[in-house]
Every structure is written in structure tokens, then in C-alpha cells.
Image: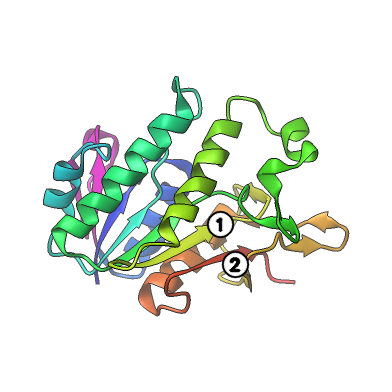
């Protein structure tokens, strides 16, 4: 497949890029600093600002799917507004380019811990998450809310589990839906490499059209 990837230089995006290339996909990576990406077979790095819909549209036109792991950076001023500005521009650009398949990597904050209660709204979230990250989690939640009303794109929203860390690729994972996945009495986790496996699996064979799903390490 010919896949456009936004956020390829980030923590999750870099793992997704590696997984895509290892599976033989042709990847166009959109980046404001494409020189950060080392030349590799199957990779085309394109200079583009994900916050500009016209630049996104020009870069992703003709692709089979777009994966967005966009994050403006946890320390940018007005993170909430910048996150949604980028997300909205990416959605507009993908639609303008006529690419239907769109996979978004969001956060765990929008997962539910009880009926009607999302993790990002709980006291424990605010106790354990650095204050600069909270606006990004809130923005990712609101981006998902907006996507639920999207009818033009064949979208999927992927929420990592609460625990996401570096680690080896096992190639295995378990799927969840709208709720935080648990490991006994603790929130479950996964390696970023195995999260990337789940993301690319979803791109290759759509199982969650116009849905959100989450994953965790295989039991």
C-alpha cells in the first residue's frame, strides 16, 4: 500500500514508520523538518506543515491511506488550541485530497473508566499526569468527539493503553473498545512497537471503521 504518515519523527510515529517499512509499504512521511528522517528504501520524506490543510492535501493526494500521529509537542504554548488546529487541518487536507481511509492515533485520556466517565476527567489522571500534558489529552478527546460525526472519511481512532513505553516487538496484542483495559487491578500497557503493529494491522485490514479501539499487551 501507499501510505502517508504524519508525525513520523515522534515517539509513536517513529514506531509506526518502522512497522510500515518492515512490511514493505511505500511511505510518504510529512514533516516540517524532513531532514530528521534518514533515507531508507520505501520512504519518501516530504516537507509539509500538518497545521496547513493545503500542504497536507498536496502531500497525501494519491495515497491509499493516511495515518496521523500528529502532536505539536507537549511543551508548546496553548497546546489545546494547537493540537486541534493541527487535527482539523489534517482532516480537511485528507478530505480535500480525496483519501477516504484515515487512521488517527489519539490518547488514552478519552477512554472510559466508568459509565459516562472518561479517564481525562478523573482526579487520578490529574494527579499522575504532568500539567503540561493535560491540555493535549483534552484536545485528543475533543478530536475524537468531532470524528464521531464525520461521514466523508472512513476513519478509525486508536487509543493506546494507559501504560505505553519503549520495548520489544512481540507482534501480539489484545483489543479493546471504549474502556480502559486492565491487567488485574492495574491499567494495562503495551510497548510502542506492539502498538505500531496494531495500528498497521488496522490499516491493512479495516476492522474498526468509524470506531475507536484500544489495545494492550497480550495476556
Using the numbered discs, state the Cα–Cα distance from disc 2 to disc 1 in whole angstroms.
19 Å
Q: Is residue 136 above or below residue 173?
A: above
State which mark lies toward you, 2 or 1.
1
Q: Which residue is mark 2?
A: 170
- The range drawn in magenta is 27-47
Image-quadrant location for residue 114: bottom right
What mark, if any, has residue 207 been given in the picture?
A: none
Q: Residues within 10 Å of mark 1 (few under 14, many from 20)?
A: many
Q: Residues within 10 Å of mark 2 (few under 14, many from 20)?
A: few
Front-lying residue, 152 or 204 = 152
Q: Which residue is mark 1?
A: 159
Q: Is residue 59 left or right of residue 200?
A: left
Residue 104: x and y in percent read 41, 56
Q: Is residue 191 visible?
A: yes
Front-lying residue, 73 or 190 = 73
Q: Residue at x 24, y 72 (%)?
A: 1
Q: Is residue 50 above or below residue 24?
A: above
Residue 135: x and y in percent read 55, 32
Amino acid at each position: 500500500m501507499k501510505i502517508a504518515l504524519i508525525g513520523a519523527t515522534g515517539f509513536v510515529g517513529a514506531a509506526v514508520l518502522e512497522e510500515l517499512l518492515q512490511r514493505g509499504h511505500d511511505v510518504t512521511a510529512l514533516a516540517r523538518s524532513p531532514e530528521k528522517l534518514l533515507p531508507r528504501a520505501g520512504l519518501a520524506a516530504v516537507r509539509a506543515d500538518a497545521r496547513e490543510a493545503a500542504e497536507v492535501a498536496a502531500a497525501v493526494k494519491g495515497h491509499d491511506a493516511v495515518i496521523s500521529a500528529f502532536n505539536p509537542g507537549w511543551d508548546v504554548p496553548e497546546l489545546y488550541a494547537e493540537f486541534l488546529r493541527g487535527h482539523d487541518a489534517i482532516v480537511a487536507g485528507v478530505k480535500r485530497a480525496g483519501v477516504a481511509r484515515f487512521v488517527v492515533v489519539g490518547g488514552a485520556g478519552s477512554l472510559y473508566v466508568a459509565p459516562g466517565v472518561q479517564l481525562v476527567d478523573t482526579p487520578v489522571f490529574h494527579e499522575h499526569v504532568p500539567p503540561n500534558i493535560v491540555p493535549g489529552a483534552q484536545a485528543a478527546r475533543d478530536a475524537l468527539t468531532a470524528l464521531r460525526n464525520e461521514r466523508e472519511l472512513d476513519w478509525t481512532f486508536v487509543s493506546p493503553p494507559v501504560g505505553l513505553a519503549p520495548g520489544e516487538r512481540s507482534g501480539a496484542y489484545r483489543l479493546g473498545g471504549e474502556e480502559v483495559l486492565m491487567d488485574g487491578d492495574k491499567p494495562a500497557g503495551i510497548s510502542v512497537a506492539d502498538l505500531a503493529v496494531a495500528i498497521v494491522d488496522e490499516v491493512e485490514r479495516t476492522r474498526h471503521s468509524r470506531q475507536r479501539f484500544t489495545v494492550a499487551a497480550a495476556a
